[in-house]
Image (cartoon, rainbow, N blue to C red):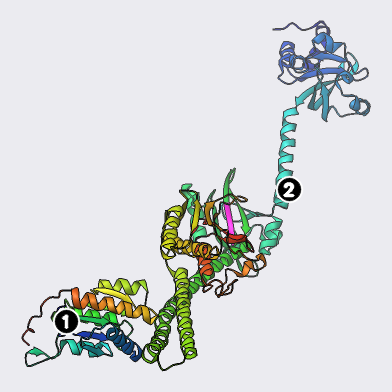
């Protein structure tokens, strides 16, 4: 045990006299009580404000030694801004026992503590003095402040949240109802506080389930809703309903669990979702309808072209056949001019026959299915050129070609396209002494088109865009024969392969046809 | 040259122009066999299958030239009926038509046609085709000898 200091020893008699008045407890006991009291205590001189006596708790709490304390005044442990207040306080007369309230003290290392002071007046060898007990409330104050901050930020959250925040206690009574909830539901906070939540905002048919869920949770601690985001139907003051997204949390309080619901009106989203799915359904139905119409049309077209190929050709055969019969049976009786007319009738019927055949081919290209595979265009080209050479052995046409020339497409259709393009090249170069057909693939602006080039008659590019229309011809039929359907057929085939076709030409310098095949076969 | 005169041809064709031109083409090719003409399917089947007192009413032709586009029964239906009957199960049938439709070609062969010839618009080419047909089916082709009709 620490020995009493000189100062305290010199004041023994003061304690003694005091003790004598109150009880028969020994002086040493009192001295011990002061010295070892767990709260910091001291005695100060009311005039000089000097410390007259300090206990161990004060020494420990403030960091000053007893000697240091006894050489200091109360002002030394006050922040500057409290000096005047202290002087004022000490000057005013106080009752014997006084709660001095909350002050700030500076401890030896310089940091500030918040203290609550109680004091008692005493006589110190005739000098007025006060016995002081200090309660350090720094931590308590910090906790209080944090609590206040948390409260105010919580209420800011509640006030400003866009979501409805509704709290209820275990009886289902509303304990909080934020402005968003007021706006959404139409109820005023003052009205709903204390009311049972299910009777206000839950549609009648769901109330029983709500009560049962609450009861089950209170009894078993089990809940199907807590912490999950669910969709519910909610009831407004005016009786209207709206779809809401709800998340429910519970908290344990002294008086049982409480619940907080975060709720959001999702009407707009629902409407958008419904509109979207309706739109999708409509679209699907439209696709189904259109497909059906397309099938019907296709079927009709099929019947039509079948009819055309049959029924248009029969009369042509008759015209040609009987013209021929006239020539054969009555050749001697008809004049040379009549005979020339008959020749022209026959030529016309053959041309019309060719037209019908080409039209049927064009129609067939549009509706036949695609069986894409890897094909060598060079191989096909060689085949076709050989056929052309056989049919027209007097022509000398040289073929320049890169081999192989891989492509992905429907072999039958691609062959039809190549036949048309090569026949054109063959035909339009027929007036050249040394005709050349070049076939290959080049790179132009991210595309790798195949090309078929001739050095023949060519044409004026001004008409290039008309070239791919059916029946469009850029040459006099006396000059070059043809039905004008071939390139329309080629374009159809290329388009069905997801590609495109274009042409570069110059009169008397030849033409180059370029085409791509994307491999994307979903084009009409 | 073997005697082909007893051999007959059945032409099933509804268009009188085509009938006349076909007959003319045969004539021009010096094919002088008898040519019976049926203008629709039922007529053709009656001609081939009708019997009286245990024998068939008409001689079995050497070859049948069958148009596809016919009134009442179309040519493929006629072909089916021809193949279903014991007398004509092996009768050579040449489809002679304007149609170049692939599905007609395929169905024609699937139903047992022996040949499929598309009538060209040009009479000259048609005459040529008829000549080759006549040569092949009347001169070179051997057919299954006819049996007696099954008892009724």
Q: Is residue A442 magenta?
A: no
**Which of the two residues, A328 or A145, is positioned nearer the viewer here?**
A328
Q: Residue at x 73, y 52 (%)?
A: A160
Q: Is residue A125 visible?
A: yes
Q: Residues within 10 Å of mark 1 (few under 14, many from 20)?
A: few
Q: Is residue A176 above or below residue A356?
A: above
Q: Which mark is residue B4?
A: 1
Residue B132: percent from the left, percent from the top? Answer: 27, 75
Residue B17 left/right relative to A132: left
Q: Chain of mark 2?
A: A
Q: Residues within 10 Å of mark 2 (few under 14, many from 20)?
A: few
Q: Residue at x 31, y 77 (%)?
A: B129
Residue A232: percent from the left, percent from the top? Answer: 55, 60
On the rendered image, what quadrant is the N terminus of chain A found in? top right
Q: Quadrant of residue A504?
A: bottom right
Q: Residue at x 33, y 83 (%)?
A: B69
* Magenta extent: A243-247
Q: Residue at x 20, y 78 (%)?
A: B138
Residue A461: percent from the left, percent from the top? Answer: 66, 64
**Which of the two residues, A92 or A203, is positioned nearer the viewer here?**
A203
**Which of the two residues, A294 or A448, is positioned nearer the viewer here?**
A448
Q: Is residue A468 above or below residue A180?
A: below
Callout 2 secondary element: helix
Residue A277 left/right relative to A331: right
Q: Quadrant of residue B139?
A: bottom left
Q: Which mark is residue A156?
A: 2
Q: Are marks 2 and 1 on the same chain?
A: no
Q: Which mark is residue A91?
A: none
Q: Chain of mark 1?
A: B
């Amino acid at each position: 045990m620490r020995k009493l200091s000189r100062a305290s020893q010199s004041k023994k008699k003061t304690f003694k006299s005091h003790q004598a008045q109150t009880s028969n407890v020994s002086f040493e006991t009192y001295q011990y009580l002061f010295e070892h009291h767990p709260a910091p205590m001291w005695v100060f001189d009311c005039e000089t404000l000097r410390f007259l006596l300090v206990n161990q708790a004060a020494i420990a709490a403030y960091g000053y030694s007893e000697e240091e304390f006894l050489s200091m005044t109360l002002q030394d442990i006050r922040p500057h801004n409290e000096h005047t207040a202290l002087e004022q306080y000490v000057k005013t007369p106080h009752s014997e026992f006084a709660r001095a309230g909350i002050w700030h003290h500076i401890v030896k290392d310089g940091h500030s503590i918040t203290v609550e002071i109680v004091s008692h007046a005493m006589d110190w060898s005739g000098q007025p003095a006060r016995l002081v007990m200090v309660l350090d409330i720094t931590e308590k104050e910090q906790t209080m402040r944090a609590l206040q901050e948390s409260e105010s930020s919580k209420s800011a959250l509640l006030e400003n949240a866009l979501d409805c925040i509704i709290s209820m206690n275990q009886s289902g009574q509303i304990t909080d109802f934020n402005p968003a909830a007021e706006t959404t539901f139409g109820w005023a906070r003052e009205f709903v506080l204390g009311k049972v939540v299910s009777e206000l905002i839950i549609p009648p048919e769901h109330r029983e389930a709500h009560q049962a869920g609450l009861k089950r949770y209170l009894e078993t601690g089990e809940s199907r809703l807590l912490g999950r985001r669910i969709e519910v139907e909610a009831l407004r003051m005016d009786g209207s309903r709206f779809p809401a997204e709800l998340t429910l949390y519970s908290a344990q309080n002294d008086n049982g669990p409480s619940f907080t619901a975060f709720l959001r009106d999702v009407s707009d989203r629902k409407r958008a979702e419904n509109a979207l799915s309706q739109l999708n359904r409509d679209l699907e139905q439209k696709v189904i309808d259109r497909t059906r119409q397309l099938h019907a049309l296709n079927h009709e077209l099929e019947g039509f072209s079948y009819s055309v190929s049959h029924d248009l050709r029969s009369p042509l055969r008759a015209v040609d056949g009987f013209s021929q019969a006239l020539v054969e049976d009555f050749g001697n009786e008809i004049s040379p001019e009549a005979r020339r007319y008959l020749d022209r009738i026959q030529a016309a019927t053959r041309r019309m026959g060719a037209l019908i055949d080409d039209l049927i081919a064009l129609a067939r290209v549009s509706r036949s299915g695609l069986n894409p595979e890897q094909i060598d265009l060079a191989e096909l080209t060689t085949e076709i050129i050989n056929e052309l050479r056989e049919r027209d052995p007097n022509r000398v046409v040289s073929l320049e070609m890169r081999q192989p020339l891989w492509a992905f497409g429907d072999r039958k259709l691609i062959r039809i396209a190549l036949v048309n393009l090569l026949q054109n090249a063959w035909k339009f170069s027929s007036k050249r002494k040394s005709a050349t057909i070049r076939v290959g693939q080049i790179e132009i602006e991210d595309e790798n088109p195949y090309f078929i080039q001739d050095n023949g008659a060519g044409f004026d590019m001004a008409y290039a865009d008309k070239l791919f229309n059916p029946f469009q011809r850029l040459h006099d039929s006396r000059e070059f024969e043809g039905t004008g359907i071939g390139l329309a057929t080629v374009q159809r085939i290329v388009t069905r392969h997801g590609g495109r076709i274009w042409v570069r030409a110059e009169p008397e310098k030849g033409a180059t046809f370029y085409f791509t095949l994307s491999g994307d076969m979903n084009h009409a | 040259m073997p005697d082909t005169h007893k051999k007959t041809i059945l032409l099933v064709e509804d268009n009188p122009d085509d009938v006349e031109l076909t007959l003319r083409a045969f004539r021009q090719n010096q094919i002088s066999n008898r040519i019976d003409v049926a203008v629709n399917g039922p007529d053709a089947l009656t001609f081939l299958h009708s019997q009286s007192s245990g024998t068939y009413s008409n001689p079995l032709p050497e070859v049948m030239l069958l148009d596809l586009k016919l009134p009442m029964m179309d040519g493929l239906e006629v072909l089916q009926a021809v193949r279903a009957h014991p007398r004509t199960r092996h009768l050579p049938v040449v489809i002679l038509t304007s149609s170049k439709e692939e599905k007609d070609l395929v169905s024609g062969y699937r139903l047992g046609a022996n040949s499929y010839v598309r009538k060209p618009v040009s009479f000259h080419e048609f005459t040529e085709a008829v000549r080759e047909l006549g040569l092949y089916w009347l001169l070179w082709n051997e057919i299954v000898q006819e049996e007696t009709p099954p008892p009724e």
